[in-house]
Amino acid sequence: GAGTDERALIEILTTRTNQEIRVINEAYKEAYHKSLEDDISLDTSGHFKRLLISLIQGNREEGEADLARAMEDAKELCGSTDEDSGSMESKFISILCMRSYPHLKRVFQDYIKLTNRDIEQTIKNDISGDVRNALIAIVRNIKNMPGFFAERLYKSMKGAGTDDKTLIRIMVSRSEIDLMNIRHEFKELYDASLYSFIEGDTSGDYRQVLLALCGGED
């Protein structure tokens, strides 16, 4: 519905561990006296709803890559592109939302061997809407999670106005996890420091807090 911030949901659910997702579920229940899964069910529909529910349950596998199974998964994804869009989306959701990240890294390598193209290109070409955005977020996180966050931060500040919610959420949630890596990726991608972007795009106490979280110029 109108109240759903799809991009925030995608960002949060595709970058958290099972344990972190369980903590989010508990905190949500405590704050709103209802389950996040129920609210997502009411607020979304179709394959996007199925994808989010799959992520919110926090049941992603956690092991290393199983090489034989990775090739099977890659073949299944490869074959699904000849099916109707609904069947294809279902296959992509079931594999990308349930397999472990190390395993999916291998699946994506095998997919390139089988098709000569990156799986992200297939998703962009053949899937649309929120499902496409969520699947691309998963792929980009597996390839380079700090790079994914660097891009989100850049988009939150470029152009007219600032997406404050995204800026604050990422700066606070990643400050003790991988913010140094995000700073490095930001500089690589945009040839400017995250610090200088925050400095130019915010003001007052808000700016000081964000710069303190950022921790320095690169």
Image (cartoon, rainbow, N blue to C red):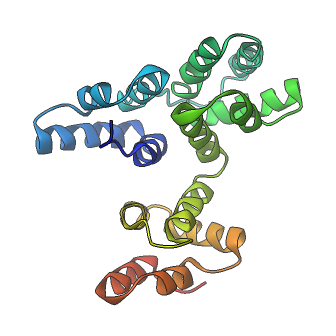
162, above or below 39, in the image: below
Is 61 in front, or is 30? 30
* Residue 33: quarter of image: top left
* For residue 145, above or below residue 97: below
Give above or below for 126 relative to 149. Answer: above
In the image, 140: left or right of 33? right
In the image: residue 166, left or right of residue 153: left
Q: Position of residue 193 (x, y in %)?
A: 61, 80
The spot of residue 35 in percent (x, y) is 20, 31
Q: Residue at x 79, y 37 (%)?
A: 118
* Total numbered circles: 0
Q: Nearer the viewer, residue 54 or 199?
A: 199
Q: Residue at x 31, y 25 (%)?
A: 41
Residue 205 sits in quarter: bottom left
Is 145 placed left or right of 69 in the picture? left
Work out whether residue 113 or residue 9 is closer to the camera in this orientation and state it.
9
Residue sitting at the far bottom: 204
Residue at image position (54%, 80%) is 197
Q: Say left or right for 155 vs 213.
A: right
Placement of the N terminus among the 4 image quadrants: top left
Q: Position of residue 103 (x, y in %)?
A: 64, 30
Residue 218 drawn at (x, y percent)? 61, 84
Relative to 173, residue 9 above or below: above
